[in-house]
Amino acid sequence: SSSDYAKRPAAPGSSESCGHAGQPRIWPNACWRTTTAPRLLDWAKRSHRDFVILRVPGIYARDRLPLERLRKRLPVVLESEAPWSNRIHADDLAGVCVAAMEQNVSGCVLNACDGHPGTMTGYFNHVADFTGLPRPPQIPLVEALETLSPGMVSYIRESRRIRNRKLLEILDYEFRYPSLEQGLPLPKTALST
């Protein structure tokens, strides 16, 4: 639950939160959502400016893949313990940006994702299969929280399943790549293994 999430401790060796003493810890991206986004929307209203916030999770495309991480064989969390991963293909993100500019949607906050979340480990495995690289080794979540980079730990802690229903309803955008499988289709040989 979100209340359990707020009680999680800080990433080891980090001070990456923005709560006040006595308040629940808020992680960096959540901090931005809870403090900066409302101020920007308020500024837009007072200034009579159009303003749309697109919350963009992971962006992928053939030229934006974690190949170096896969080549280094850096571990990922066990599939059974892996956090959610939401994403959008770079071409679809560009299309969503154009649609948001062309339509009168000022003041909206939209989740710009393809609406087909998976796990972080599933994403890395799919990219490995797509590129022909070995799948990364998997480690338990407890070990990951102690050994992964602070950025990756923050991502794991903030990860949640995101819906894009509002984006689809308001922008009436049709995705070119509505899922990772369509954005990075596996060769038939990979599908049979």
Image: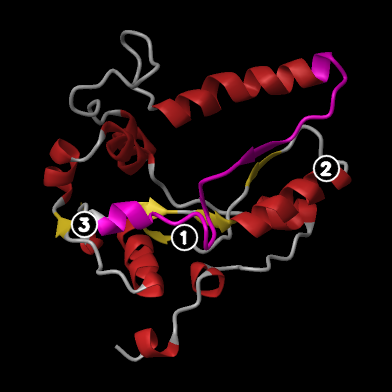
**Mark 1, secondary structure of its residue:** loop
* Amino acid found under the numbered disc labelled 3: Arg
- Would residue 169 be seen by someone viewing this image from the given angle? yes
**Nearer to us: label 1 or label 2:** 2
**Which residue corresponds to mark 2?**
101
Give above or below for 13 relative to 106: above
Q: Earlier in the sequence, mark 2 or mark 3?
A: 3
Is residue 31 part of the magenta span, yes or no? no
Rendering coords of residue 154 (x, y %): 33, 35
- Would residue 103 be seen by someone viewing this image from the given angle? no
Residue drawn at (54%, 60%) of the image = 61
**Which residue corresponds to mark 1?**
117
Q: How many labels does the image show?
A: 3
**Nearer to us: label 1 or label 3:** 3
Residue drawn at (74%, 55%) of the image = 95
* Amino acid found under the numbered disc labelled 1: Pro
How many residues crowd mark 3 within 10 Å: few (<14), some (14–19), many (20+)? Answer: some
Q: How far apart are marks 2 and 3 (CA)?
A: 41 Å
**Mark 2, secondary structure of its residue:** helix
Closer to the camera, 180 or 51?
Answer: 180
Is residue 70 part of the magenta span, yes or no? yes
* Amino acid found under the numbered disc labelled 2: Met
Residue drawn at (75%, 56%) of the image = 169
Residue 26 sits in quarter: top left
Region rendered in magenta: 45-71
Q: How far apart are marks 1 and 2 (CA)?
A: 25 Å
**Which residue corresponds to mark 3?**
73
Give above or below for 191 relative to 18: below
